[in-house]
Image (cartoon, rainbow, N blue to C red):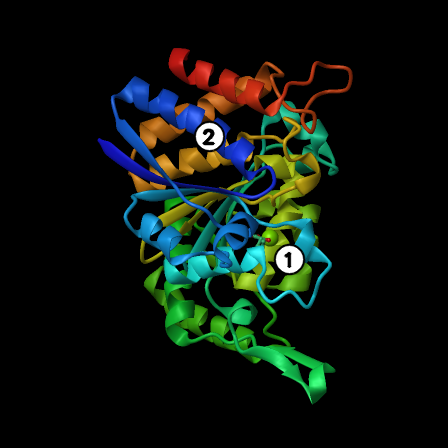
Amino acid sequence: MKLRIAELPGDGIGPEVVAQAKKAIDAVCKRFGHEVSYQFAKAGACAIDEFGDAFPESTFKTCMESDAVLFGAVGDPRYDNDPTAKVRPEQGLLAMRKQLGLYANLRPIETFAALVDKSPLKPELVDGAEFLCIRELTGGMYFGEKGRLDGGDTAFDTNIYHRYEIERILKLGFEYAGRRRKHLTVVDKANVLESSRLWRQIAKEMEPQYPDITVDYMFVDNAAMQLIRCPKFFDVIVTENTFGDILTDEASCITGSMGLLASASIGEHTGVFEPIHGSYPQAAGKDIANPLATILSAAMMFEYAFGLKAEGALIRKAVAASIDEGFVTEDLAAPGAPVYGTSAVGDRVAELISKI
Ligand code: IPM
Ligand code: MG
């Protein structure tokens, strides 16, 4: 198969971790006889520097002409403490999601037996926890009307959702639950928010179409507690954009490192595969960032964008093997055990892909 991948490494550690994912992709393509090509494009602070735009038209075009987007991270400390900045690297990510119609962000949470001690939670709570967060990605407060009033002293963001937006994401929630343990948790704040009441109303309307699925409804504050109190309760979580952003960072604690969480953003046009961690500027260029989340995002790319399950599974197997043998970056290394650099871990995973 011919695979055209748009490569958008972005800022900070983005380029380093994307380079490691490419090693894994190349190794798997070599093994299975696929022909892969990469189209490089800029997004985030690096694109602002060159084009004055965090998601330039040329980058959009490259994405549209590709079968999948491999994305690193965006963000730059130059903008973080400047609330007056007119252009921001994060706008590039949001523009990409919106323009590509990527309304669903799939964030699987899985634990690796060798890493249960890395989680701040008790091992017996996290060992075996495995669930999927489905975050709505192109609506809600992120994209609703926002602005300032009163000469700047009043600010607002509008949490707006239309029926079609809710229906399509809930449909995915029911479908993924149907392929898994048939348990869907709809997370909202229906005791307070009108938009959440519409989510809940629509979910209830849809329930009869999926009689084999157990659905429960949880307020987001309670969900935040249950996630760390009993993560094994969950199978599929579906929720709105803002709640999903917050809950998935929280959920990353279950796995032991944010450096392990992959994601797939899918919808109308080319899907984007990216780690959930940010650009981690303090680590940029130091060869210390954990590349596994991006490598696991590449595994999701094979499964979701190309429908190549065996290829994705092989990448996962190689990642698990590298963890088992302790070939990991500092965030995952056991006390006193050797620590490997970003690039060495990338080489090792690619090597494991070629030989296991
Ligand atoms: C994420 C990130 C982004 C978000 C930021 C960088 C805009 O936190 O992908 O979770 O809030 O969606
Ligand atoms: Mg986030």
Image coordinates of residue 219 in percent, x first then y, are 62, 65
Residue drawn at x 68%, y 18% as measured from the top left? 339
Residue drawn at x 42%, y 62% as measured from the top left? 98
Q: The disc labelled 1 sits on which kind of residue?
A: Ala
Q: How many marks?
A: 2
Question: On residue 343, which mark appears?
Answer: none
Residue drawn at x 56%, y 22% as measured from the top left? 343
Q: Mark 2–mark 1 contact, CB under 8 Å?
A: no
Q: Which residue is mark 1?
A: 223
| Quadrant of the rendering where the C terminus is positioned | top left
> Which of 72/350 is in front?
72
Q: Quadrant of ligand 1?
A: bottom right
Image coordinates of residue 18 in percent, x first then y, are 49, 34
Q: Which residue is mark 2?
A: 21
Any atom of ligand 1 within 8 Å of the CB at mark 2? Answer: no
* Image-based side of 23 in relation to 275, left or right: left
- Residue 270 appears in the figure: no
Toward the bottom, the furthest residue is 150
- Comes first in the chain, label 2 or label 1: 2
Image position of 217 with respect to 355: above or below: below
